[in-house]
């Protein structure tokens, strides 16, 4: 199909996407990357940080830190997406090597499990410091797991023997059956912040009996499979209170702490 972009909007979108790809490519080439750290808090005990999620940032030539939400859609199905996973894991392992008392989760795509550079990054990190495995949590989205379920299952079984934990991210997007969830043996469920009854799943929860019922069902599923349940996108004190009352194990969101480049161990 010939794309001459006679439509100004299409041309603008194409230019934007090309600029995004170039920015990400240059950031990876020159090592302009960093992790921002967001705490995951024990429900009912805001002083207890159970672990941090390491969120990739790329740094543009002007020194601005760009979050993944601004570029991941354009790169996730490209070679750059694979390299982003590698860099995220590399930065996460480096953090754990320096901070043995920190537990850290990093994102990965189940579709990239066999990617040689990512596998080497993980193997090299664990060979140098096998003890890092007990503090590393790998988060895979429900969508990516369902794209390669058998590969994900075997990989998880092998890695859990080494002490790694796994979280299923964005759970509730509608891809995973209960039978499949049982077969994977995830350690953590992170509820999808975009499930909608009347707004986001965990947003304005105090005013939504329907969403409260949905969340309670997910909490029950997590308990049945002996998984910790994390509520994401917690933005208000009232929502945190309702989630705690419903029985969620952990809370994550701007109400508890925004992603930061200067976590406590760097202050």
Image: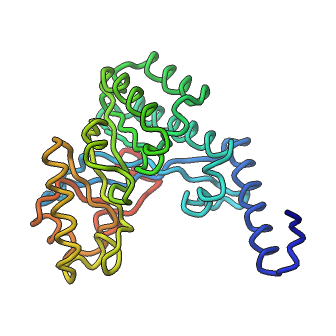
Q: Quarter of the image holding residue 152?
A: top left
52 horizontally vs 44: left or right? right
Residue drawn at x 32%, y 38% is 102
Residue drawn at x 42%, y 27% is 155
106 horizontally vs 134: left or right? right
Q: Position of residue 246 (x, y in %)?
A: 11, 65
Give the quarter of the figure containing the N terminus: bottom right
User: Which residue appears farthest toward the top when viewing the image?
Assistant: 127
Q: Which of 202/92 is in front?
A: 202
Q: Position of residue 106 (x, y in %)?
A: 43, 43
* Image position of 180 with respect to 200: above or below: above
Q: Which of 58/106 is in front?
A: 106
Q: Quarter of the image holding residue 184?
A: top left
* Image position of 40 with respect to 4: above or below: above
Q: Which of 194/21 is in front?
A: 194
Q: Which of 174/78 is in front?
A: 174
244 horizontally vs 146: left or right? left
Q: Position of residue 174 (x, y in %)?
A: 37, 59
Residue drawn at x 78%, y 75% is 10
Residue drawn at x 35%, y 73% is 196
């Amino acid at each position: 199909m010939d794309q001459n972009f006679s439509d100004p909007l299409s041309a603008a979108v194409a230019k934007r996407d090309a600029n995004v790809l170039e920015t990400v490519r240059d950031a990876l080439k020159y090592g302009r990357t960093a992790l921002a750290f967001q705490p995951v808090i024990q429900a009912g005990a805001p002083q207890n940080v159970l672990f941090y999620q390491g969120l990739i940032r790329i740094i543009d030539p002007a020194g601005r830190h760009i979050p993944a939400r601004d570029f991941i859609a354009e790169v996730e199905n490209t070679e750059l997406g694979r390299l982003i996973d590698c860099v995220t894991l590399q930065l996460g392992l480096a953090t754990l090597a320096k901070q043995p008392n920190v537990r850290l989760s990093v994102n990965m795509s189940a579709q990239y499990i066999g990617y040689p550079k990512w596998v080497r990054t993980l193997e090299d990190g664990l060979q140098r410091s096998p003890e890092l495995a007990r503090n590393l949590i790998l988060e895979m989205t429900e969508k990516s797991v369902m794209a390669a379920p058998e590969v994900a299952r075997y990989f998880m079984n092998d890695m859990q023997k080494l002490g790694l934990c796994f979280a299923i991210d964005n759970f509730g997007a509608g891809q995973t059956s209960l039978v499949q969830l049982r077969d994977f043996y995830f350690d953590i469920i992170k509820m999808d912040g975009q499930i909608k009854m009347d707004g986001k799943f965990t947003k304005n929860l105090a005013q939504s009996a329907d969403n409260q019922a949905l969340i309670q069902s997910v909490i029950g599923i997590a308990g049945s499979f002996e998984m910790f349940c994390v509520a994401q996108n917690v933005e208000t004190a009232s929502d945190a209170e309702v989630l705690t009352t419903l029985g969620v194990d952990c809370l994550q969101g701007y109400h508890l702490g925004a992603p930061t480049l200067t976590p406590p161990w760097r202050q």
